[in-house]
Every structure is written in structure tokens, then in C-alpha cells.
Amino acid sequence: MTVEATRTYVGSIQNQQQVCDGLDSLGDSASKIWNVARWTADRIWDEAGEIPDEGTLKAYMKNQSCWKDLNAQSSQKVIEELSDAFQSWFDLRHKFDEANPPGYRKHGDTRPKSTVTFKADGFKHDPEHNRVRLSKGKNLKEHWSDFLLCEYQIRPDVDLSEVNKVQNVRAVWNGDEWELHFVCKVELETNDSAGNEVAGIDLGIKNIATVAFPDEYILYPGNSLKQDKHYFTRAEYDTEGENGPSEKSMRARRKLTDRETHFYHTLTDTIITECVERGVGTLAVSWPEDVRESDWGKTGNKKLHSWAFDRIYQYLAYKGEIRGVEVLKENEWDTSKTCSRCGDATKSNRVERGLYVCESCELVANADCNGAENMRQKITPSLHGEDRSNGCVAQPSVHLFDRESGTFQTREQVVS
């Protein structure tokens, strides 16, 4: 069976020197459109007490000279991104004092050259010769047919001539040079169901994922993420240059982002592979409904809003779909305080962050394992096998991320 999915493939530009100035102009133009629209929204906010919607901003901006610096669809995309940024701000501003509205894009800031998106009539793709023609805006053309011809190289296992459709092309400044992102519709072969077993996942901040498999509990701690964040955000990397963050700071932030992406992909690949090997065809993932609206205090809110539970779920969902594992989003309400053996929901059972002791049936468990088992039982009400001994849930296996190999490896148990 096949399913249609959206994938983004990154291509390096081989004729960077020839097209760099042109892409710089497009990136600067996108920033100018953003800034004019941002200033307009700010003015309307001051006068009317509301932010204009996407349609209103587009109608106004079409009369501004900078609108024609880009292809019309590319200009519209900038306004759509600004509207999304305002919506995110609205969702947070009533709950958190630290929520800031979208800012202006200035030279030297974290977005010195804005991403430019080319939709259907903004590009012509020649996958046979690895070339793509990008439209310039009317104001930037020297003559009516002027365009940028980019020669690109993509990873060897990807053939863009075989995808169903390249939906759009994005020119992205990665901090050092321009690169192309091809957003494509592709058909993927999917496997039949991996099996009839059920597993549950408790997602967390310290233990990124805790999985209750039919025959074992496994913890996947986030130690390496924490270490990377500490290392790459030290004061020496956060220094400000005359025009904003230093190049050293920007390189460190990109490195941190790359490492986080690799970690989450490796984590979700590992979990889905474990499901397939154990005959798990259904995976219940804890979903912290409305958690972003919670107030955990200044320090806690920073951790809360960097918690990538939605990203992990998305990765699990599409990887599971391909390999025959159905990934279900389940509300985690009360799973942390409810005993997975007897159902007692006394709040004091959660003795401390990592320990769960049931006052009713005397179950002693790792708190995250107890939560993961409750997630599993949302799909199947049966107990976790016949053996529900304290050792089973109190001493789970721990798989640590190994930077050298880039994989998760089992931590050796110390026997006294």
C-alpha cells in the first residue's frame, strides 16, 4: 500500500557565486515587505486596538512599491508568515509576560536575510539537469524575462524527477550561504501492521520518552540535549556584536539546532524500530492538552516552551505510518498520579519527581514508567503481562544517546 506525504529535501547551490547577489536582493526584499507590513500592523494596533488580518494586510501591501520586488505569490507568503507570527503571539500574550510580538528584520539580527518561498508560478524545475529557475520581482528585473538559474546538488538517495510534485521551492540563508529547500509530494510504500501488541509512551522534559512495551519498560533520557544546550548557550556564544549576535554565536545556535534535529530523528527511529521488532502495531502517545497555557514560573516556562512533545509526535506518526505502526495521540490527563495496577488516583502517590508509591496496592514504580503504562492501558485495558512486580516498573532499562555513534545504547546495569 502507498500513502502520499509531504517531504522537504535540502539542496546545496553549486553556482553560489553567480546567484548569491540576486538571492541577497530577494532576501532583503522579503525583509522589507515584512517590515512595512509589521509597521502597518503596529500603526493599526495603536489606532484601533487590533491587528489587521491576513487579507487586509495583503490588500494594503499590494499598493506598496516593495510588493513588486518579489513574485506576487512570494510576497503573499511573507504576509502569511507575519500573520502566523502574530497569531502565535496572541496565543501566548495573555498567559506569559515574556511573550513578545514579532519584531522587525534588521541587518545583523538572527534573520538578516529572509527566506523566500517560490510557489507554482514562481519557479521552473529541471530535475534532469539539477537546475531550478527562480522568478525575480518586477522591480528587480532588468528585462521582462530576467530570472535566477540555480544549479543544485541534493543527497544521492533522492531523485526529484520521481516525486509526484514539487509544491514549492524555498531559498534559505543558513548563516553562511544560500540553500534550496524543495517541498515535495511523494508516494511512500507502507508496511502492513507491525503486529497486534500495544505500547504506550509518556513524553517528558527530563526523560524525553518512556515507553511501556508489552514485555519491558525503556527510558530515553535527554541528558545529551541538556549538555548541548548548556555548552552552546554559554556566555561566550551569546555575545552581541555591534549589529546583533556575533558570527560565533550564530554558528553555535545552528550547531545546536542541527544536533537537536538529529537527536529527535534518532529517538523516534529507535522507538518505531523497537515497536516493529516487538510486534507492536499500536502506539499510544501522551498528549499534554493545553499545557502551553500553564504557568510554571519564569524558569519553568522556558523549559515548557522548549519542550518538543509535538515535534516528537509528528516524527513518530509519519515514521510509524510507513512501517505499519499506528501512532495515536491520547490525552495524558491524570496518568501521572493514577496507579497503573489498581487505578488509585491519590495525588500523594507521586512521592517525588521520579518515584511513584501506591498507598492502596503498594506498587513501587518509576513515575514515568507508571505514566507510560497508563497510556498503554488507554488502548488495551489488560495488565502489563502476568508479572506486575515492583522490579518490573521500578527498574526500567535505560537507553542513553551516544554522540560518537549517533545512536541510543543500553546503559549497563550495575549489580551490587
Image (cartoon, rainbow, N blue to C red):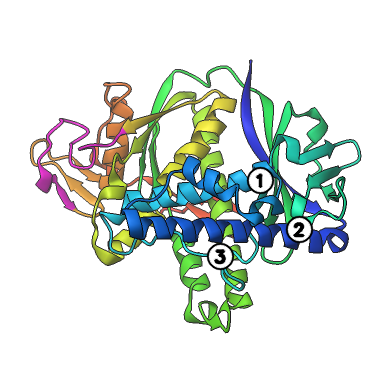
Left or right of 326: which side holds 12? right
For the point 33% across and 29% down, which residue is it?
376
For label 1, the residue is: 74
**Number of residue marks:** 3
**From which residue to which does the magenta span run?**
331-351
Quadrant in the picture for the N terminus: top right
For the point 13% across and 45% down, which residue is it?
349
**Which badge, 3 or 1, is on the more N-terminal residue?**
1
* Mark 3 and mark 1: Cα distance apart in space: 17 Å
Under circle 2, the secondary element is: helix
The percent position of residue 94, horizontal first and vertical second, equals 26, 54
Under circle 1, the secondary element is: helix
Quadrant in the picture for the C terminus: bottom left
Instruction: Tell me if I can see residue 416 in this picture.
Output: no
Q: Main secondary structure of the magenta part?
A: loop
| Residue 23 circle label | 2
**Which badge, 3 or 2, is on the more N-terminal residue?**
2
Position of residue 377 relative to residue 104, above or below, is above
Left or right of 2: which side holds 387? left
Q: Is residue 309 magenta?
A: no
Instruction: Tell me if I can see residue 195 in this picture.
Output: yes
Looking at the image, the residue that sits furthest to the front is 63
Position of residue 19 relative to residue 182, above or below, is below
The percent position of residue 243, horizontal first and vertical second, equals 58, 79
Q: Are marks 3 and 2 in contact (CB under 8 Å)?
A: no
Q: Is residue 335 magenta?
A: yes
For label 3, the residue is: 105
Q: Amino acid at mark 3?
A: Arg
Q: In this orientation, which residue lies closer to the viewer: 17 or 379?
A: 17
The percent position of residue 215, horizontal first and vertical second, equals 39, 31
Under circle 3, the secondary element is: loop
